[in-house]
Amino acid sequence: MSAVAATRATPAAPAGERVRALIVRFAPQLLLILLLIGVALINPVTISPNNLVNIALNAVPIAVLGLGAMWILIAGGLDLSAGFGVAMCALVLGGGIQQGQPLVVTLLMCIAAGLALGLINGLLVSVLAMPPFIATLATMAAVQGIVLLLGKQGTVIINDPVLSGLGSVRPLGIPLLVIVAALIAVAVAALARWSRFGLYTYGLGSNKHAMAARGAPVLSQTLLVYLFGGLMVALTAILLVAKVQIVDTNIANTNLLLDAFAATIIGGTSLFGGKGSVIGTITGAVIISLISTSLVVLGVSAESVNFFKGVTIVGAVMIDAAIRFLDKRESA
Amino acid sequence: MKIFRSRGLVVATVALAALLAGCSGGSQPGTSSEPGSDSGGKPSVGVAEINLSLPFFVQMEEASQAIAKDYGVDVTWQSADGSIEKQISSIESFVAQGKDVILIDPINADAIVDVVNKASDAGVKVITMGNKVGGEQNFNTLYPDHDNWVQSARVIGNAVGGKGKVLFLIGAVGNYVSDTRQKAFEETMAAEFPDIEVITQPTDFDSSKAGSVTQTVISNNPDLAAVASISDGLTLPAIKVVEQANLDIPFVSNDGDAAIFPYIDSGRVLTDVITGSYRVGAWNTAVAARLATGASFDNDLFMPTYTIAAEKGAQAVKDAGLDVATITTEEATKLATDYVAEFGKAKSDGDMTVG
C-alpha cells in the first residue's frame, strides 16, 4: 500500500490525488487522531497527560503481540495459539521466580517456551503442510491444557526488583515498558525493511509459488516466521508480567489475542498476506487501548463496555475499509 | 506441493482419529437403566460441568475425585465446553448410563429445567450447583454470595466513613456469580451508603485487565477511598497498582486464594470470603454421595463459607456492627485443602449445610 501510494504521490500528480494518497497511506494514524478528537469532545480529561500515559502503557502487550501476529499474517499464515502462548510463557516465568531461579535463567526459559511453541506451529504448517488455522487451533488447545497444568503452582506475586522496576520505572514520566516496546518495534521495523528475512516474509505472503520457483527457501522461511511469532509471544509475556506483577492462568487469554488481531487489522495488515507495517500495527494497538481506556474514563456502564468497544472497533475498521475501497475505485 | 498436501491430509486424518479416540476414552454411553449399573455396584455420580478449561473447575474435579474415594462412590466429570446443548446431552447420557445422582453446574438455569425434570422422573437425583433451578424435585447447592457481599459492602462502606469513591471490580456481566455479588454490593451501597460513589468496572476475569482498569481509575480519581473486588485474581493486580501509586486504601475481596493472605495479615485487605474451588468440588460431591446412599436433605442446601480477617479486618467487621465470626489466614490455609476433614464421610448430614 505504501509503495503504491508513494508512487502516485509524485510532484507531477494533481494535488487532490496526492492528498488522497496521503490519506490512504496514513489511514490508521488519521483514524487515531479522529478518535482522540472524538473522545476529547465527549470529555477532555480522556486525553489528559496521565490518561495518554495509561493509553500508551495499556497498548504495550497488544502492540508487541500484534507485531508477532502481523509478521505471521504478512507471510500468509495465522497463529491462534498466541494468546494462551502468552499465558504459558508468563507461567513459566512466574514458576521460575517462585522456585528461586536466577532471573536470567527464568527469562531464558520463558523465551525457550515461546520459541518451542513457534517451532511446533512452524513445523505443522511448513513441514506437515497443515492449514495454519487448523494447526494453530490444535496447538491453542494443547497450550491451554499446559496453562492449566502450570497453573497448579497457584498465583505468583512478582517481587523481583528487575521485573518490578521494568513495570514501574518512568524515566522522564514515560513508562520504561513503553520505551522497551518502542525499541522492539524499531527492531522489527528494521528487520522488515532491511533484512532478507523481512523481504522473504513479504514474498511468502505475496506469492509463495513464485518464491519457490525462484529457489527461495519457502519451508525454512515459514518455520522462521513462526519462530519469530513465538519470540514475540515470549516478549509479550515478559512485558505483561512486569506490568501486572502477578502471574496466574488468567493473565492473558483470548481477549489479548483478539485485541492484538484487531490492532493488526486496523493497522492495515492484510488477512491474505503480503501487506502490513509496524507503524500501522503500533497505531492499531494504540487505537484499541484508547478505546478500552476511554470507556473506563468516560464511565460507560459495566453492561455496555463490551458493546461500545465492539461498535467502535467495527466503526474504525469500516472507516479504514472505506478509505481503501475509495482508493481502489479511484485507481481503477 | 502435492506431497505436502497429502502429508497434511494424513496428519489431519490421524489427528481426527486421535480426537475421536480421546472422546471415546471418556464415559461410554450405557444402555442399562439400572441405577449404579455402570460402576460395579458402587453408587455412581455424573457431573455436567460448564467447562474443564478453567483452573477453578479443574480443581473442583480434583477435590471431587479425592472425596469420592472417601465415600466409596464413582464420579464421572464431563465438560459441556460452554454449550447448553452439550450440557443437556451430557445429562441425558448420564440418565441413560443409570447414574444415581447427577450434579449440574448450569450454563443456563432456565434451559435445563426440562431435562432436570426428565432425569428426576427417571429416578435419578439431581443437584444443581450454585444456581436455583426451578425443577420439581431437584436439590440446589447454593453459596451465600448475596449475604457475603452485603457484608462486604457494609465493611468497606463503614471503613471509608460512608463517603467517597469505591472502585468495584467485577468479573463479566452475565456471569451468575459475578452478577450475584455485584447486585448485593451495589444495592447495599445504594441503600445504606448513599454518599459513596461506586465505580463498577468489568474485567472479564482477566488479571491484566483488572490491573489496567485500576490504573486508569486511580489516574482519574486520585481521591479513591477503597477497592472491592469479587475475586482474588482481580484483587492482586489491583493491589499492585495501588502500591505503586503509594495509596493507603482498604480492599475487600472473595475466594480465599493463599496468595492474598499476606495482604490480609498486613491489613491491606480487610476481609476475604473463602469458598475455594477444592471446597466447592468436595462439598457438592459429598452431598451427591450422601444422596446416592440414602440421605435426605431439604431441597436448598447452603455451603458453609468463612470470612477471613486479620486484626485490622476483624475490627472493621465489628465497627460495621456485623455479628460475624472471622477466621485467621492460618485457619483458612488449613481449611482450603482439608476438605475431606470438613465434608468427608465421618461428618454428619447436618454438617453439609448452614442456615
Image: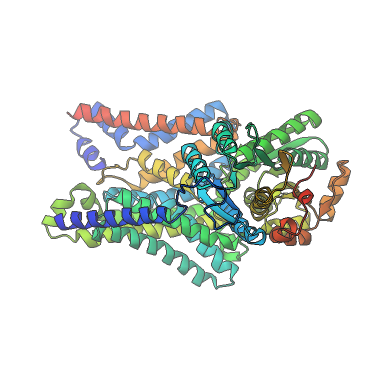
Lateral position of residue A331 relative to residue B347, left or right: left
Kindly indicate the quadrant of the structure image that contains residue B186: top right
How far across and down, in percent of the image, does residue B58 sit?
Answer: 56, 54
Q: Quadrant of residue B109?
A: top right
Residue A281 left/right relative to B86: left
In the image, is residue A156 above or below residue B297? below
B131 relative to B261, above or below: above
The N terminus of chain A: image quadrant: top left
Q: Is residue B270 visible?
A: no
Q: Nearer the viewer, residue B77 or B120?
A: B120
- Residue drawn at x 13%, y 60% is A215
User: Percent x, y for residue B330?
Assistant: 77, 62
The residue under the point 23% across, 53% down is B9
Give the quadrant of the C terminus of chain A: top left
Tell me: A243 left or right of A124. right
Q: Position of residue B188 (x, y in %)?
A: 76, 33
Q: Is residue A324 above or below residue B352?
A: above
Instruction: Decide which of A127, B331 is in the foreground and name it.
Output: B331
